[in-house]
Image: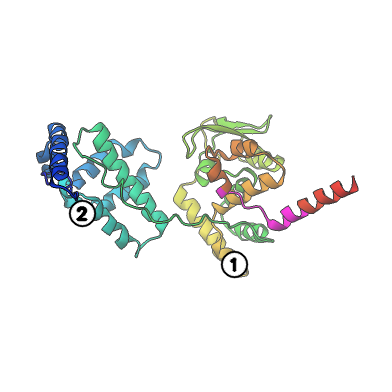
Amino acid sequence: MRRAGLKPRAQSFISKADAQRWIRQTEQELDRTALACDPTQLENTTVADLIVRYRREVTPSKRGAASEDKRLEVFLRYQWAKLPLSKATPQVFSRHRDIRAQEVSPGTIIREMGLLRAVFETARREWDIPLPENPLAKVKKPRAPQGRQRRLNGEELEWVLEAAQDTRNDWLIPCILLAVDTGMRRGELLNIRVRDLNLADALLTIPETKTGYARCIPLTERAVTLLRKRISAGSRPDDLLFPVTPNAFRLAWEHCKKRAARLHPDIKSLRFHDLRHEAISRFFEFGLSVPEVATISGHRDLRMLFRYTHLKPEDIRTKLQTATNRREAA
């Protein structure tokens, strides 16, 4: 059975009576769908139309608007963006997924598919676009890559700090140490303002986070000292402690790694975000509970928190042996 703008339906039966009964029921269902769905609208609206509108109305309100805007711009270059919605089937995006699998990582494909699905879902739910279903809903995503387990090894922190001393800026070393002590993200570090600090109580408020929820974190003595040095006598409450652009920070970090890698090649694989992994893992090794670590890190999903936690097996072995010895001695 075929209807314009709707997915064809087919079914096999042993008896003709059953087939005719299914025909009548299906026709009634399609008739009800047709009352709410204008096939001509799906023929006259392209995928690009949805992307452009989403880019104009929805993307600007997001914290990651800049990166999402670029991704949507890339979508508009694909041939499937020119298709009318009546032909935007799951198979179209399955083929796109398979082609992208030869070009980018599974994680990138998952993010792209998630964004496309959000575009179609917004069109269905908020823009009265009569799509019978979201074409991305039935497209199988590639298997998510295993989370990074990179931590600082041996004297890597000292090597990075030594290389950072050769830079002309005065903010890279404090940012590195603060990332290890607090587990803050790069964007959170660069957004610290004077008004966010309560150095008397060793607390820092992070009003804008990736999850959209503000949090207040405790500071180590070293972190308090580092942050206090960033405040001058003429500092105002709205002043940034690290007035650096994300791109400038990225370039400084990469140059620092290159200098360190001349003597220690293994450090090439270290990312700045790995310092957050290091910090969270250390929090657990210090004996903090799961709720306490989640309060500092800002994770609201414990599964994601444990993905950031990479305890060293040798440390667990030592704790286990110590506990066993105490029990036997008792």
Q: Amino acid at mark 1?
A: Asp
**Residue 16 on the magenta span:** no
| Sequence-earlier tag: 2 or 1 | 2
Residue placed most toward the observer, 182 or 174? 182
Left/right of residue 185 with respect to residue 82 in the rendered view? right
Q: Residue at x 49, y 37 (%)?
A: 209
Res 59 → quadrant: top left
Res 296 → quadrant: top right
Q: Amino acid at mark 2?
A: Trp
Left/right of residue 136 with respect to residue 48 in the rendered view? right
Q: Is residue 113 above or below residue 120?
A: below
* SS at mark 2 in the image: helix
How far from the left and from the top, in percent, is residue 85? 17, 45
* SS at mark 1 in the image: helix
Q: Residue at x 26, y 46 (%)?
A: 135
How far from the left and from the top, in percent, is residue 314? 72, 58
Disc 2 and disc 1 in contact, CB within 8 angstroms: no
How far from the left and from the top, in percent, is residue 241? 55, 39
Q: Which mark is residue 266?
A: 1
Q: Residue at x 35, y 46 (%)?
A: 114
Using the rendered image of the protein, determine whether residue 191 is visible from the camera's viewpoint. yes
Point out the image quarter for the C terminus. top right
Res 122 → quadrant: top left
How far from the left and from the top, in percent, is residue 104? 37, 61
CA gap between label 2 and label 1 equals 43 Å
Left/right of residue 210 with respect to residue 31 in the rendered view? right
What segment carries the magenta color? Answer: 307-318
Colouring style? rainbow
Q: Which residue is mark 2?
A: 80
